[in-house]
Amino acid sequence: MTLTRIAAVLLMSIPFAGFSGNTELDEAKQKIAKLEAQLAFEKAKHPAPETVKVTPKAGSKGAPQAAAAAAVAIASAPAAPTGQQWNYSATADKMTGGTTYNAAVSSSNTVSFDFPYSGQQHGTLRLRIDRKYGKDVIFSIEKGQILCHSFQDCVVLVRFDDEKPAKYAAAGPADNSSDTIFIRGYDKFSAKLRKAKTVRLSVNIYQQGAPVFEFDVSGFDQEKFQPKSK
């Protein structure tokens, strides 16, 4: 029973034509007191609802402000650092007393050769500075036979960013291993690499054609590669 109905029932029981004496007045007071007690009980039984704060949903007036704040937070977030793909190392040569510096990066793509060299593999591009051997640009694969001998130069096709592909001479190592070549023209190659974001390299592989290896060379750090002497 609602509060309104309770009040109506109790009030209807009170005579409004007038009171015939103290007895009826006392009865009226008792009924009014009973009514007030009943109303208080119902209020305690059915409390008023609390005010709830609602977050604006999409399409509401508050949504554009929330979206704008999120966009500002995203825009002000620091950009992801570049150059993390490079691996730098420095090795002391106990014989010469010098230091060999290396900066290597793996290809961002993989290639797969036929048997017996089947399976996905990356290529590696490396810059090396050594007191004994000088400066070198070295390209290597994990498995397979690069058609480039130590006693006869071969041709490597190299493309820096969107430039036209250029031919570079290369030679195999002195131990006649077939998975590594040394690209000639270190100064020219390294100067272009430091300004580029992508280097693509293609070389003939025995019975595998001339696959293209793509390298992300962005963020190259010359100081990490060869720190200046203090």
Image (tube, rainbow, N blue to C red):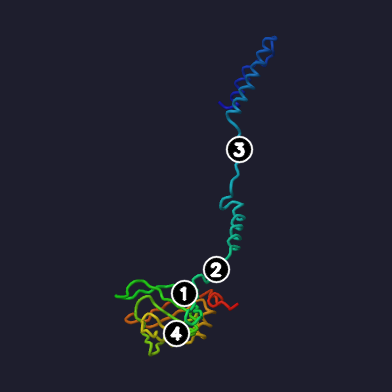
Q: In this view, does 81 lie above or below 94?
A: above
Q: Which of 114 and 28 is in front in this view?
A: 114
Task: Calculate the distance from the C-alpha at mark 3 to the C-alpha at mark 1.
Answer: 63 Å
Q: Quick check: 227 left or right of 174?
A: right
Q: Nearer the viewer, residue 50 or 200?
A: 200
Q: Which quadrant: the N terminus? A: top right
Q: Earlier in the sequence, mark 2 or mark 3?
A: 3
**Mark 3 or mark 1, whichever is nearer to me:** 1
Query: Mark 2 highlights which residue?
Result: 81
Hey, what amino acid is under mark 4?
Ile
Task: Calculate the distance from the C-alpha at mark 1 to the C-alpha at mark 2.
Answer: 16 Å
Q: Is mark 3 on a helix, strand or loop?
A: loop
Crowd class of label 3 (few under 14; some 14 to 19; many from 20; radius 10 Å): few
Residue 217 disc label: none
Query: Mark 4 highlights which residue?
Result: 183
**Mark 4 or mark 3, whichever is nearer to me:** 4
Task: Calculate the distance from the C-alpha at mark 4 to the C-alpha at mark 3.
Answer: 77 Å
Hey, what amino acid is under mark 1?
Val
Task: Calculate the distance from the C-alpha at mark 4 to the C-alpha at mark 1.
Answer: 15 Å
* Residue 138 percent location from the top left of the image: 44, 81
Residue 50 disc label: 3
Q: Is mark 1 on a helix, strand or loop?
A: strand
Q: Which quadrant: the C terminus? A: bottom right
For the residues labelled 2 and 3, say whether their Cβ atoms are less than 8 Å apart.
no
* Residue 166 percent location from the top left of the image: 46, 86
Query: Mark 1 highlights which residue?
Result: 105
Q: Which of marks 2 and 4 is nearer the N terminus?
A: 2
Hey, what amino acid is under mark 2?
Pro
**Mark 1 or mark 2, whichever is nearer to me:** 1
* Residue 224 percent location from the top left of the image: 54, 74
Hey, what amino acid is under mark 3?
Glu
